[in-house]
Amino acid sequence: MTLLPDTLLSGYRSFVQGRYLQETQTYRALARDGQTPETMVIACCDSRAAPETIFGAGAGELFVARNVANLVPPYNPDGEFHGTSAALEFAVQALKVRNIVVMGHGRCGGIKAALSPGSEPLSPGDFIGKWMSILQPVAETVAANALMTSGERQTALERISIRTSIANLRTFPYIAARERAGELRLCGAWFDISTAELWAMDPETGDFQRPLVDVEDAVI
Ligand SMILES: [Zn+2]
């Protein structure tokens, strides 16, 4: 028996013999000089929506925090454990990133849970239910909309959750201050894992549109 899963070891072998070999100088420079990523991405834990893969990013390029359903909680310095807020604090205060991108994705299990709270296999005492309550009451409003199909409700809440998270980002005083000063841009994105479509949020209207539709249409 190996100490790590075989798939990880074979993947690591490919990495060392491939990318690391080709980019050794980059890795060494990053080790020597430290990281200076310009962009933080807040993404879902979902194994199908890895930001580094989707954006073709190399080492040192993206500062990534992943959590269930790519949510940003409101600013709440209450002495409790706040992993996402800690990552935000480091990215903005120490690394001084220029962009924060909240990236949602299609078929998100966390969003599905928010639309049907208490359903199997979740129980009221689980962490996911408490975490997804960040989206109340919008989740309840969307869940109660009988005019939409379940698929439409799912996509709608995935996108509403991105706008909610961006609003919550602005409750962090240093994020709001840096955005006001023109030093930080807050963006929303949504990735469709079934078609590879990338949708980006218009900061004025909140609507989502496809910035590279011509590229996607040529491939998909
Ligand atoms: Zn997800």
Image (cartoon, helix red, strand yellow):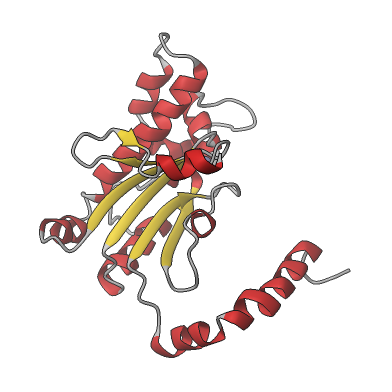
In the figure, is residue 32 to the left or right of 79?
right
User: Residue placed at 51% from the left, 35% from the top?
Assistant: 106
Q: Is residue 160 above or below residue 184?
A: above
Residue appearing at x 76%, y 70% in the figure: 9
Residue 178, given in percent of the width and then of the height, sits at 16, 61
Determine which quarter of the picture holds residue 183: bottom left
Q: Where is residue 143 shown, x and y percent of the image? A: 43, 19
Q: Which residue is the extreme one toward the right?
A: 1
Q: Is residue 104 left or right of residue 23?
A: left
- Say whether residue 213 is visible: yes
Q: Is residue 196 left or right of residue 80?
A: right
Along the viewing direction, whichever of 61 and 165 lies nearer the viewer: 61
Where is residue 179 shown, x and y percent of the image? 17, 57
List the single residue furthest toward the left.
Answer: 181
Q: Position of residue 211 (x, y in %)?
A: 35, 43
Q: How many marks?
A: 0
Q: Residue furthest front?
A: 218
Quarter occupied by the C terminus? top right
Q: Residue at x 41, y 47 (%)?
A: 103
117 or 177: nearer the eye? 177
Find the residue positioned furthest to the bottom: 32
Q: Is residue 89 above or below residue 194?
A: below
Quadrant of image for the N terminus: bottom right
Residue in view at x 55 percent, y 43 percent: 219
- Whether residue 75 is visible here, answered yes or no, is no
- Asked if 26 appears above or below 98 in the picture, the reply is below
Q: Horizontal placement of 146 versus 175: left or right?
A: right
Res 166 quadrant in image: top left
